[in-house]
Amino acid sequence: MPITFHKAAAAFAAFTLATSGTAVLAQTHDVMILDQAFFPAVIYVETGDTINFTNSADGSRIVKAPDESWTSEPLSTGSTFSYVVDSASPLVFASSTGHGGDGYEGTISFDEPPLGN
């Protein structure tokens, strides 16, 4: 009887790890929205990770995908917008004041980060 219990417990543990592994490994990445750029400009992510965009610019900013599959409300200085990355996420994100002509871009990469990151 104890052997059967141990086998069942091991099988349950393996199943739990296999089905919840992504959630356990998901990370949060912080990106500052500056006046003329994002910092960092390239974010190395995996599906399920969250990107927290914090507006550190002097004025209100909008952050969005260029195809507008996701977009934030206007963010006042100090405000944050969170986006959960999925396999269909655009590989670029952009910011603007909402008045046109003053935008800039950052990059989402599913590649391994370079050494030192």
Image: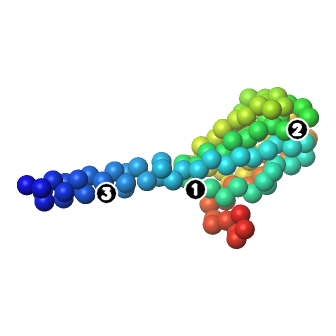
- Which of pointers 1 and 2 lies earlier in the amino acid sequence? 1
Q: Within 10 Å of the Cα at label 2, are there few (<14), some (14-19), or many (20+) other Cα atoms? A: some
Image x and y of residue 26, in percent: 54, 50
Q: Is residue 20 left or right of residue 35?
A: left
Q: Evaluate if marks 3 and 1 touch, with contact meaning CB atoms under 8 Å apart.
A: no
Q: Position of residue 108 (x, y in %)?
A: 69, 55
Can I make out residue 25 in this image?
yes
Label 2: which residue?
Answer: 57
Rounded to the nearest angstrom, the CA distance separating label 3 from label 1 is: 22 Å
Label 3 environment density (alpha carbons within 10 Å; few <14, some 14–19, many ≥20): few
**Which disc, if any, is residue 14?**
3
Which disc, if any, is residue 46? 1
Find the distance from the CA under tag 1 to the CA under tag 2.
27 Å
40 above or below 112? above
Horizontal side of 117 relative to 48 (left or right) equals right
Compared to residue 116, the image places residue 78 above or below, namely: above
Q: Residue at x 90, y 42 (%)?
A: 35
